Amino acid sequence: MEEKDWLILNTLYLKKNITKAAEQLYISQPALTYRIQQLEKEFGAKIVSRGKTGVEFTPQGEYLVKYAEQMLHELRRTRERILNMNNQVAGTLRLGVSASCARYYLPPLLKSFVRQYTGVEINVKTGWSSDVLSYVQKEDVHLGILRGSHSWSEPSLLLTSEPLCLIANEQVDLHDLPSLPKINYVINDPRLRQDIEKWWMEKFSVPPFITMEVDSIETCVELVNNGMGYGIVPSMSLQNHKSLFVHNLQTKGGMPIMRETSLIYRSSSLELSVVKAFVDFMSSNLENAVG
């Protein structure tokens, strides 16, 4: 087996479809099918079969996929370590980033970083913050930028802390909220959901009047902007909506309810010059912001 075989097995296992896997690998379907057949001859075992819902891997095939994943992982680590021996900040920096950070926070920082380190390529993988945590744990990425509080025992760097806000397209009396239409969005962070629910229960004895459930903060903000109701969102999402009525939420004791953004990574990753350079860059930007 060679690297291309590991990639074929890994991609086909993820896509579960010959056509989609061939497209992602930029090879023809016959070429992919032929290579699978050759692997089956090499190992003397059936690797895949075609079912009604797509490609299905046999137990032998799943075992080979695990081997392929391990080999691709080790090959990537080896290449990174060898490149790092030159003591130059170069190579590929793999980042896992929560979707909201990727949209609002990260672009100008990455632009500045690659200007400073022209030999670095950036690979970004987005998802929910819980996904980003998993990416770092599995070493799919070097570093993760995520939102909220998470269980992470290795190094982390607090990047931002912003207030949670109630927003509307015009000023509202907070006492009227139970009778006003509320726009909810999908919240994947249990801590954030608990903070919002606790704030509401401290102020009201009835549930909110929810009229819409949407899939993203961005959709929620746009609907609020068009007068369809009020919402509760982190202030980061309001960068392009300066005219909205904004009220920062506070606890019963008068403390602002904050939403944190953090950078997490493994200590061992700092052995790579590109990772250390990015951590130092982010720390420096924080210092400059404070200053």
Image (cartoon, helix red, strand yellow):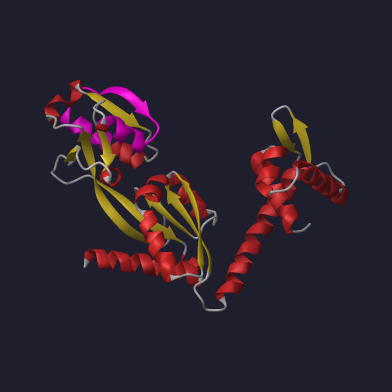
- Which residue appears at 64% of the width and 62% of the height? 74
Magenta-colored stretch includes residue 123: no
- Name the residue: 72% across, 53% down: 6
* Residue 206 included in the magenta stretch of the image: yes
Q: How many marks?
A: 0
Query: Along the horizontal axis of the image, is 38 left or right of 133?
Result: right
Quarter placement of the N terminus: bottom right
Which image quarter: residue 138?
bottom right
Question: How far across and how far down the image is residue 200, in percent?
Answer: 22, 31
Image: 171 above or below 85 = above
* Residue 286, image x, y percentages: 29, 64
> What stretch of residues is rendered in magenta?
196-224
Q: Residue at x 39, y 55 (%)?
A: 107
Left or right, 213 with respect to 266, comes to left
Residue 62 position, x and y percent, is 72, 44
Position of residue 211 relative to residue 90, above or below, is above
Q: Can residue 205 be seen by looking at this rendering?
A: no
Residue 274 seen in the figure:
yes
Left or right position of 269 against 209:
right
Residue 179, x across and y down, in percent:
19, 20
